[in-house]
Amino acid sequence: MPDFRLPDLGEGLTEGEIVTWLVSVGDEVSIDQPVVEVETAKAVVEVPCPYEGVVSARFGEPGEKLAVGSVLLTVGAPEQSGSGNVLIGYGTSETPRRRRPRASYARNRGLPRSEHPGSPLGTPEPAPSDTGRAVAPAVISPLVRQLARDSGLALDRIAGTGPGGVIRRADVERELAVRTTPDPTHDPAAAHDAAPAHDAAPSGDRRIPLRGLRGAVAAKLATSRREIPEATVWVDVDATDFLAARAAMPTVSLLALFARFAVLGLKKFPELNSRVEGDEVVVLDRVNLGFAAQTDRGLVVPVVRDAQSLTTAELAAAIAAHTASAREGRLTPAAMTGGTFTVNNYGVFGVDGSAAIINHPEAAILGIGRIIDRPWAVAGQLAVRKVAQLTLAFDHRVCDGGTAGGFLRFVADCVESPVTALADL
């Protein structure tokens, strides 16, 4: 009977946490059928099984971390009667074994997927019966389970407001707010007298484990601050013509245009598309462009590979597709690794500037602030223009201020004269 081991799910990932088993012992599985949801430091992914047969053993429970290479499942041959060995795709059993419905598409199509092994796909769990027998609550998202677990909340005590009673993130957050809000009818003095001294801990405290995606981001940011001698330069730019050019290209986002200008700048100043390895600076010949995207799971950085070979329209389409995948939780770990330069549009949060932290082991990150009306001198006259601040944080080991300033000035010139810049593409 073959053992299916936890595979390598992406660059640098050494372990994964079991979120949900999609099969039970005794279930029949087919080749490439997803059998378990695993949360890595990058994303929640469904892991397909390379074998066909019957699940004879599972290893690990939800919430347990397994190292890459650890055994996940043991798969035996399908049941047979009256004949010898059964090849994949062939058999003599007239009564097929039960096969679990594949739940891999339920989450992507927005359908509730039951937690209970006997419930059909897309059907939420029934309420507890009159006999008191408990059933698992209806939850689609593993992130909702994680939030409830970290907050110490029991899902079976939370009323779901989603379709068919599905418990959503807002339901968990509402329950958490209720439990952490003081009751105005409560008598603190009486409670103090009645409660033992060791129960007097502050009720509003909440601990958030630094693990999974949050832990990976924390580790990378700490490594960046610890290892990279970082410097920052910034410049204000007149983005009036930039916004006019963007309006003429409805399929190209503001971020995509900034990304296009950054890629052009890296062609002129390739030292910023590099990394430090030991006592050497490795200047890279491919631009794998990362961009910061805010999702329900936190900040992620999808990567558009070989951005230097894409047209403006192709780059815009790739950024839009990656953004959609990130917000839907469908990005693979491989789609968030291997970046060589990052663009961060923090202007969407209503801020003008930021000393962004470099996405280690990259050498630089370009930041874009909000675009707002400001007084600006135009041909010796004061006018109101659309102005933004651009910021470049860079690793001072890979270049000096002249190179960093030259790159940032080039991008700023592209923003102020976008038609001229785009005409060269």
Image (spheres, helix red, strand yellow):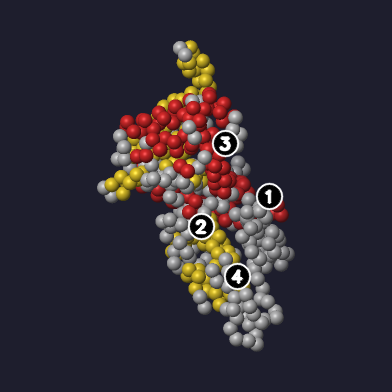
Q: Which mark is residue 39?
A: 2
Q: Secondary structure at mark 3?
A: loop
Q: Nearer the viewer, mark 3 or mark 4?
A: 3
Q: Residue furthest bottom?
A: 82
Label 3 crowd bin: few (<14), some (14–19), many (20+), radius 10 Å: many
Q: Secondary structure at mark 1?
A: loop
Q: Residue furthest top?
A: 381
Residue 379 percent coordinates (x, y): 47, 14
Mark 3 residue type: Val
Which residue is label 1 attached to? 161
Residue 417 percent coordinates (x, y): 49, 25
Q: Secondary structure at mark 4?
A: loop
Residues tagged 4 and 1 counted as in contact (Cβ below 8 A): no
Residue 187 percent coordinates (x, y): 57, 44
In the image, residue 313 sits, relative to residue 151, either above or below, namely above
Question: Between residues 84 and 179, which one lies in front from this camera angle?
Answer: 84
Q: Nearer the viewer, mark 2 or mark 3?
A: 3
Residues tagged 3 and 1 counted as in contact (Cβ below 8 A): no
Residue found at x 70% / y 81%: 94
In the image, residue 87 sits, relative to residue 149, either above or below, namely below
Residue found at x 40% / y 49%: 219
Which residue is label 3 attached to? 252
Q: Which mark is residue 30?
A: 4
Q: Residue furthest right?
A: 130
Q: CA distance from mark 4 to mark 2?
A: 23 Å
Residues tagged 4 and 2 counted as in contact (Cβ below 8 A): no
Mark 4 residue type: Ser
Residue 186 visible in this rendered orientation of the protein: no
